[in-house]
Image (cartoon, rainbow, N blue to C red):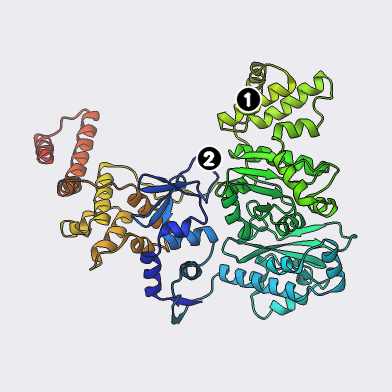
Amino acid sequence: MKRVSQETIEKVLNDVNILDVISPYVSLKARGRNYFGLSPFRTESKPSFSVSPDKNMWYDFGSGQGGNAIQFIIEFEKISFGEAVKLICEKHGIEFIETGATEDNNVYDSLYEIHELACLFFQSSLHKKEVEDYLKRRSIADSIIKKFRIGYASDSWDDMLNEFKGKFEESILLESGLFSKGKKGLVNRFRNRIMFPFFNLSGKVIGFSGRSISEKEDVKYLNSPETRLFQKSKVFFGSYLTFPNIRKNQFAILVEGQTDFLRLFSEGYHNVLATSGTAFSLKHASALKKFTNRVLLAYDSDSAGINAAIRTSYVLLQSGLEVRIIDMKEGLDPDEFFIKEKAPNEAFKALIKNALHPVDYLVLKKKALEGGASDQSRFLDEQLLEVIQIKDPIIVNDLIKRFATKFQIDEGEILKRIEKIKPNQFTERSISGEASQDNPNIILSDTLLERAEIELLKILIQNSSMKDKISISDFSNQYIKEIATKILEDSQEISISSLLDSFGSSPKLRNFLASLIIDYSEKDDLNLIVEDCLRVIHAEPTRQKIQLLRSQIQQLEDDGQQPSTDLLKELAELQKNLKK
């Protein structure tokens, strides 16, 4: 990819409102001069992600990450700098200009290119009678096939591999997840399958789910493995087209598979999502919560679907989302429901209207009230093991009331059961696949000297008029000094977005800089504050000398010796100078 022109970068940073860039990804609410929402990078229940339009930057207080609009897109979409700039330009009508010099394509560029080519390859192979018959049986319209770019992976072991071999290195082909490595080398991962592509929120292909058209195949659905692009613990099928409608409709309909998704979408339910055979996770819930607080589950009504709906309900409740479950009865899935019903749209709307609370659903489906007293007691304790994982006391109290009503017992009895369960359980269950990230912050020692240097740097960032009062030699901390040097050596005033951009290749420095900017508040007596900070900084050699003399005196006294008069006089003189 060619290098992006500086003119284009400046236009993106200065002309595009950062709220317009971030709002499609994060639901933001105004709080004073800033906007807050749930972090798009972590699972959380209270908003700690801040966007400052005045400073043209964002900051995630929980993780310590921050930056400008371009850096947000890089972090969220996992794409290169050039692609992030291009994406913003395309969405906001800015001409994307590249310079003549080229730079090496990074891994993300190659992975996106491979997935796009694979999608085109699968689409070109779609016209096979067996495949067309399958799609016709499922009543999937041509318009839907085109819209969601459905394709077909042939029964060949290497047809797509041969297409890609000369274009990409073997390491990239393997990392894409589209190929597997056997004894004889790489082979196609997907064979004889209808291919459903997954897209990220900018419309790029990031992975696939393949549905076998052979009844002899043990694995009906095969998904792409975890890659840099495809993280199945938080990706939904169809989200690229339906997230905006979910925000508009203020609720999401969640189904299990692609065919259920496509059926609902084709029937006009454009606020639908599918997990596509992947267990619903807290990361899924976190991604969903950015667009809505209400979820309607339309899972299969067989035994496996019922259990999945119950598990998903608890995950959603743990994340603070409101949940209702559609009971389709008769063992149908949503796709079959619309095919078999005489007036499916009206009937499905009635199901939505009468959707059940999770407690009502699980008590009904598990026939919890039909067993004896010991069975009911055991069932209730099993459910309370899930309830104690929920942190929101309002949701917990609501569940306690509903269980108490269902089992006709006092709420106090349920609270006693919870108290008995708690000591034997972890307060928080581990989340599969969610390894803790390294702290992206620069950790300082919080000495008086560093606090003075930080305060000086904050003032310098926001007030270029102070540049003539501060010099590079006033800073000793290497991180603080590097940022200060950039500001002081720049002959012109540098904007906050451009300053953040200049440290884009060093995430730790950029995040540290963002934390200083977001923490700054306007002060009246800047000159006085600068003088105080400089006094602390310039007195540091004296303080160090005093500390050294004190250590020497302490050592002499410990050895039973009397410190010399000159030593004591020097210490007194230094202390006197320090107070001036």
Q: Nearer the viewer, residue 572 or 100?
A: 100
Q: Extreme bottom residue here? A: 100
**Which badge, 2 or 1, comes first in the chain's sequence?**
2
**Residue type at the position of mark 1:** Lys
**Residue type at the position of mark 2:** Ser
Question: Which of the 4 image quadrants contains residue 240?
Answer: bottom right
- 144 above or below 477? below
The answer to whether mark 2 and mark 1 are in CB contact below 8 A is: no
Q: Which residue is mark 1?
A: 422
Crowdedness near tag 1: few (<14), some (14–19) or many (≥20) residues, C-alpha within 10 Å: some
- 385 above or below 124? above
Q: Tell us which disc is closer to us: 2 or 1.
A: 2
Residue 481 is left or right of residue 373, and the answer is left
Q: Which mark is residue 45?
A: 2
Image coordinates of residue 64 in percent, x first then y, are 43, 48
Helix, strand, or loop for circle 2?
loop
Image coordinates of residue 304 in percent, x first then y, are 81, 43
